[in-house]
Image: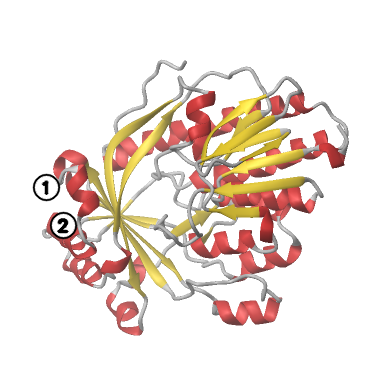
Amino acid sequence: MNKSALRVIVIGAGLGGLALAQGLHRDGIDVAVYERDASPTSRAQGYRLRMNPDGLAALEQLLPQHLNRLVSATCSIQPPSAYFDDRLDPIPSTDPGRGDEGGRNVAVNRLTLRQILLGGLGEIVSFGRECTGYETHADGTVTARFRDGSHTTGDVLVAADGVNSPVRQQYLPHARVMDTGVRTIYGRCPLTEAAVAAIPERLFTLYSGVLGPDHRHLGLAPVQYRPPVHRAVAELGGAAVEFTDTEDYMMCLFSAPAELLPLSDDELHSASGEQLRDLVMAQTRDWSPRIGTILEMWDPATVFPLTIRSTVPITPWQTTAVTLLGDAIHAMSPAVGVGANTALRDAALLATQLGKAARGAELIPALRDYETAMLDYGFQAVRTSAEFGRQRMGQAPLPTDAR
């Protein structure tokens, strides 16, 4: 298959899908991305991410040089992660997500990274296009169908559309996604001068985990731009990238087993930011007073709940022109903080294999090599995350019966 003949359809414009599109576009491969959301900012999707050596290496491979410079300039570099009890006394940890296990680990703002990944893609990415399913054809091509009645056909269909992926549900109906039993409430504390003065210096690490009783867990992680984003854009020529979220902040998350919370899931997801903040303050009332001070500074407009789910690992399937990456195939607990890094690793490997196909290699064997490696490291990350989620947050264990 020659280069001009290969067309790749990517469903989902999250980090993994956009990174893949960047790599394919850089390689001259025809790629189109379709995203159901109306815009990159139409719903809350999380805040700070830890980038580990796998994720950073993937970006280095996939992005043009000027976008990689922007990634480096907008990273927040912090001391290694640390853990504390509910009195804020240090405790030892062997958590592989601590960030000091070797290699470079940095914090990034999820939206900032997503906006960098959109840089230069232009009309390659279409928003407001919800994929409802696909059809395969005798000639090996695949047609993706959308809620608005439109459709598009390509040689490869990549499901990068998250844990609720309609493509996965059609392609691998036996694949299971389980409720871990953990509920997380995310929020942000603006890092004003007053906030920086009020927050203990020892909490300004890559990630500070506060372990309370009954698997209650508070996570704190700063994002501090050095230099300020507007200066980095001016100095590095990033005018084509539109940044909309550039203030320093402390990401705050609270996790607990669902049965310990006073609200049902429906009530949790309909509660206001103020109500969710008050719930967390009530759950941590007996903790260090410094915790209450931090929670009082939460911006209610940034607070939202999330049900933590995890893929149940499955056995390999017969490779076709439909494949998957990221949360669409290996969603995992955030306990170790490697979900985004694993999706970017997927994107880098898949871009390499599709590049081989575009230059004459057989497509299906190239995709099979990708899936074989991805299922190995991806499901290992799922298992590791589940085990630390069980230890830290009371997550239900993964079923052992792979299908």
Does residue 109 appear in this view? no
* Front residue of 205 and 187: 187
Give how far across and how far down residue 118 sits, in percent.
62, 60
Q: Which residue is at 86% across, 40% downward?
A: 3
The amino acid pointed to by label 2 is Leu
* Front residue of 59 and 208: 59
Give how far across and how far down residue 83 sits, in percent.
33, 54
Q: Quadrant of residue 179?
A: top left
Q: Is there a contact, CB below 8 Å, between mark 1 and mark 2?
A: yes
- For the residues labelled 1 and 2, the Cα–Cα distance comes to 8 Å
Tell me the residue that label 2 is attached to. Answer: 279
| Scheme of image coloration | secondary structure
Q: Which residue is at 61% across, 35% downward?
A: 144
Relative to 71, say whether 190 is above or below: below
Q: Quadrant of the N terminus?
A: top right
Give how far across and how far down residue 280 sits, in percent.
19, 57
